[in-house]
Structure formats: C-alpha cells, structure tokens
Image (cartoon, helix red, strand yellow):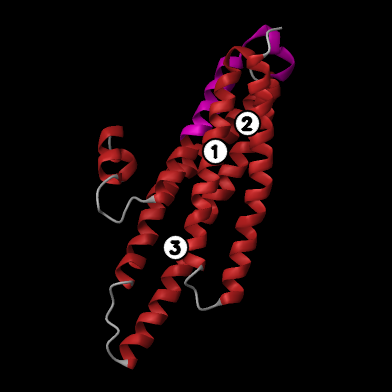
C-alpha cells in the first residue's frame, strides 16, 4: 500500500526504476494534497462570525472535499494495480504469429483498463477545482493563498493524469474507443484549466494589490 508509506518512502519508491507508482499515482496524490489545502481553508472558515452566511455552504464543501480526498488516495493504489499488468504485457513474447496475437489481445485489454484510472483521477481533480472556485469566494481571506496553491495542485493533477490517458490510447488498436477517451480527457482539460487559471490569477491579483 503506497499511501501507507511515509512521505520519504513514497518519494524514494517513486524515484526508483520500479514501474509503480508512476505519473498516474503521483497525479492522484498531488490532487489529494490540493484538495486537502482547500479543506484546510474550509475548516479555518468554520465558526467565523465574519463568514456566518456561508457556514452551511462551507460544511457542504468540506463533506464533498473529504470524499474527493479519499477517492484520490484510493486512486493512487488503483493506478498501480492497473498499470502492473500492462507493464508485464509489454514484455510478452512475440516470436510466433500465435504469440503476437495473444500479446496484442492482452495489450488491448490492459491498455483499456489502465486508461480508466487516470480518467477518473481527472474527473476527481476537476471536481476539486470546482470546490476551490467556491472556496475562493466563501473561504476566509486569511488563507486565500492556500486556495490558490490548492487549485494549482489540482490543475497539475488534472494535466498529469491526462498524459497517462494519452500514452495508453496512443497504442490502442481500437481507434474509435481511443478517440472517445481522448475527447473526454480533452474536454476536461479545457474546462479545468480555464477554471483553475481564472481562480489562480484572481487570487494572485488580490494578493499583489494592497487594499
């Protein structure tokens, strides 16, 4: 269980030549850290008289954020689970026509399986970005910089996971299915990056301008 390791242990295994964890798992972890920063802002806002009108909204945000964090942590492990069979499939023999056909069949299945997890990481990262948008308005201003850091991390998770989709779809024989997954990922990239950048730069302006 990679997520049960210490930070130092996780970084050590990530930097090794072991195939897992890789970019997908790292993206999920970064997304979880980003959402955790958003949760911190929410918790700092709870009980503050200045933000009394937002208290119920903040409670709802915290519930959603906790679920996203949990799901992203699980996806760190899930990404390793689905990538390992794919890494083994690359090493299958292809000396005879029968071996080639078997390898191709296994490769296609494992490529499709391995694409689903980074797509899910993207979906959760996008949900996290949307919560940061709400926190940028309703969260305590003393921690507004953490909303900016959190949304930057979630954007990184979104983009990082997308590359893990694209590297798998690139080698699929079923091009229609590959294009479908690519379109789904591309739509999330457009929506997520536009929103994350808008949130980030609005916060940057707030911090740079002295009121």
| Residue denoted by label 1 | 154
| Label 2 sits on residue | 132
At x 54% / y 78%, what residue is drawn?
A: 174
Question: In the rendered view, would you say 140 is above or below 101?
Answer: above
- Whether residue 60 is visible, yes or no, is no
Mark found first going from the N terminus, 3 or 1: 3
Element at label 2:
helix
Q: Are marks 1 and 2 in contact (CB under 8 Å)?
A: yes
- Give the vertical position of 111 relative to 8 (above or below): below
Q: Nearer the viewer, residue 73 or 144?
A: 144
Q: Quadrant of residue 38?
A: top right
The disc at residue 114 is 3
Q: Is residue 48 magenta?
A: yes
Q: Which residues are magenta?
A: 33-54
Whichever of labels 1 and 2 marks the residue nearer the N terminus, that label is 2
Q: Residue at x 51, y 59 (%)?
A: 165
The quadrant holding residue 206 is top right
Q: Residues within 10 Å of mark 1 (few under 14, many from 20)?
A: many
The percent position of residue 68, horizontal first and vertical second, equals: 54, 40
Question: Label 3 to label 2, Cα distance in Å?
Answer: 28 Å
State the predominant SS element of the stretch in magenta.
helix
Furthest residue toward right: 53
């Amino acid at each position: 269980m990679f997520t049960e390791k210490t930070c130092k242990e996780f970084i050590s295994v990530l930097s090794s030549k072991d195939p897992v964890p890789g970019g997908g798992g790292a993206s999920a972890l970064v997304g979880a850290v980003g959402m955790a920063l958003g949760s911190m802002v929410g918790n700092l806002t709870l009980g503050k008289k200045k933000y009394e009108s937002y208290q119920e909204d903040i409670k709802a945000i915290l519930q959603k954020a906790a679920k996203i964090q949990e799901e992203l942590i699980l996806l760190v492990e899930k990404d390793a689970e689905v990538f390992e069979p794919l890494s083994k499939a690359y090493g299958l023999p292809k000396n005879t026509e029968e071996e080639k056909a078997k390898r191709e069949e296994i490769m296609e299945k494992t490529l499709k399986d391995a694409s689903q997890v980074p797509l899910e990481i993207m979906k959760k990262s996008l949900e996290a970005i949307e919560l940061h948008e709400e926190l940028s308005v309703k969260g305590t201003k003393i921690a507004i910089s953490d909303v900016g850091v959190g949304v930057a991390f979630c954007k990184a998770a979104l983009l990082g996971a997308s590359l893990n989709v694209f590297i798998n779809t690139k080698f699929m024989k079923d091009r229609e299915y590959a294009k479908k997954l690519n379109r789904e990922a591309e739509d999330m990239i457009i929506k997520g990056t536009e929103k994350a950048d808008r949130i980030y730069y609005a916060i940057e302006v707030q911090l740079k301008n002295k009121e």
